[in-house]
Image: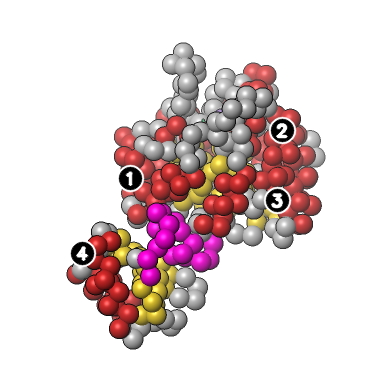
Amino acid sequence: MIIVLRAGSSDAEVEDVCRRIERMGYRAHTIRGELRTVIGAIGDDRGKDRLKSLESLECVEAVQPILQPFKLASREVRREATVVPVDGVRVGGRAIVVMAGPCSVESRAQVLEVAAKVKAAGASVLRGGAFKPRTSPYSFQGLEEEGLKYLAEAKRETGLPVVTEVMEPEKVELVANYSDILQIGARNIQNFSLLRRVAETRKPVLLKRGMATSIQEWLLSAEYVLSGGNPHVILCERGIRTFETATRNTLDLSAVALAKRSTHLPVVVDPSHAAGRPDLVLPLSLAAAAAGADGLLVEVHARPEEALSDGAQALRPRELRDLMDRLDPVLGAVGRALWRPEGARRAALL
Ligand code: PEP
Ligand code: MN
C-alpha cells in the first residue's frame, strides 16, 4: 500500500505517519518527490484495512494499493524519473550517458589505452570486467583484483567513473572499493543474496536483465535492491534468448519502453551483447535511443581481433566516435541530448 501525503506536509507529519505505519507492523519507506511525499508501507497486505484508516489524518490524501508486484520500483509510488548520480555523471536525466570499454580488463596497458580512447570518443563512463562470468571454465576468467586496480588507475588518468561486474556476495566490498557502479550480470539477476549485498553498499547498481527473465522478474530483482535501502538502481536490457539464432540475443526494445513507463528507474541498453556482432551495434543504439533509453553500454576494444573475450562484438574506438555522431540527431528528434563531460575534447585521431 502507499500513503500519499498532501502537498506541503511537514517533516513532523511525515515522521508521525511513518511511526504509525511501523506500529501496525509495516516497514515505512519514504519517497520524497518534487511535489509530494509518498510513503510505501511494506509488509503483509492483510493489514490493509488498518492502513486505510490513516486517510482520516489531515495530512494524508489517500491510501492506495500498489497494483504492480514490484512496489518501490513502480511509477505508482514515484511519478518523476529517478536520476542516479555516478561521480558527477547523472544517469536518468535528459542527457543519455554512453558507457564504453572492453568486455574484459586484460592488462594495464590495454585498459589505459582503451580508456583514453573511449574518453576521446565522448564516452562518460568506462566499462570493463575484472571478474568474468564465462560459460566455459576454460575461457579467460578475468584478472580479478589486479584488473580492478587497473580500472581504478584508468579512472585516475581519465576521470571516467567505472562500471564493473561483481559475481559473488563475498566480493561486493572489494569491487565496491574500486568502482562507481556495481554491475550485476545477466547470469546473476536472480542471485538474491548478491542483490541484498549490493543493496547494503548504497552504490549505484547496474542490473542487467537475465537472458531468460521476464520483465516482471527483472523488476522484482530491482525491488530487492530498492527494498534493501539502495535507491540507485539502473536497469539494463542486453537482449534475451529467443528462437532466433542469427543474432547472439534478441534486443527487447519493448522491455525498454515498458520499463520506462512502469518504473521510475533509468534504463540503459547494451547493444553489444544483444547483437553479438559489431555492425549491428550502431542501428540498435539508435533504436534504443529513440525508444527512450537513458544510456548505452557498449563494448569497445582498441584491437578487437586480439581481445580475450567478446572481440567479435567489440567496436573500435573510431566506430564508437561515429556512433556518437550518429546519435546526436536521433536524440534531438526525441528531445534528448548526449551527456558530455564538461570540457571534454574529442581527439581528432583515435
Ligand atoms: C558483460 O557485460 O561483459 C557481460 C558478461 O554481460 P551479460 O551479463 O549481459 O552477459
Ligand atoms: Mn562481454
Secondary structure beneath label 2: helix
Crowd class of label 4 (few under 14; some 14 to 19; many from 20; radius 10 Å) = some
Disc 4 marks a residue whose amino acid type is: Gly
Residue at mark 3:
290
Q: Earlier in the sequence, mark 2 or mark 1?
A: 1
Residue at mark 4:
25
Circles 3, 2 touching at the beta carbon (< 8 Å)? no
Any magenta on residue 70?
yes
Q: Quadrant of the N terminus?
A: bottom left
Q: Earlier in the sequence, mark 4 or mark 2?
A: 4
Q: Which of marks 3 and 4 is nearer the N terminus?
A: 4
- Which of the pair 48/323 is nearer the observer? 48
* Residue 207 rendering spot, x and y as whole percentages: 47, 43
Q: Which segment did they paint magenta?
A: 64-85
Disc 2 marks a residue whose amino acid type is: Leu
Secondary structure beneath label 1: helix
- Which of the pair 316/9 is nearer the observer? 9
Secondary structure beneath label 3: helix
* Residue 276 rendering spot, x and y as whole percentages: 63, 27
Task: State the mark number for residue 280.
Answer: 2
Residue at the image point whose x is 57% and y is 46% from the top? 255
Task: State the mark number for residue 196.
Answer: 1
Image quarter for ligand 2 equals top right
Crowd class of label 1 (few under 14; some 14 to 19; many from 20; radius 10 Å) = some
Closer to the eye: label 1 or 3: 3
Disc 1 marks a residue whose amino acid type is: Arg
Any magenta on residue 340?
no
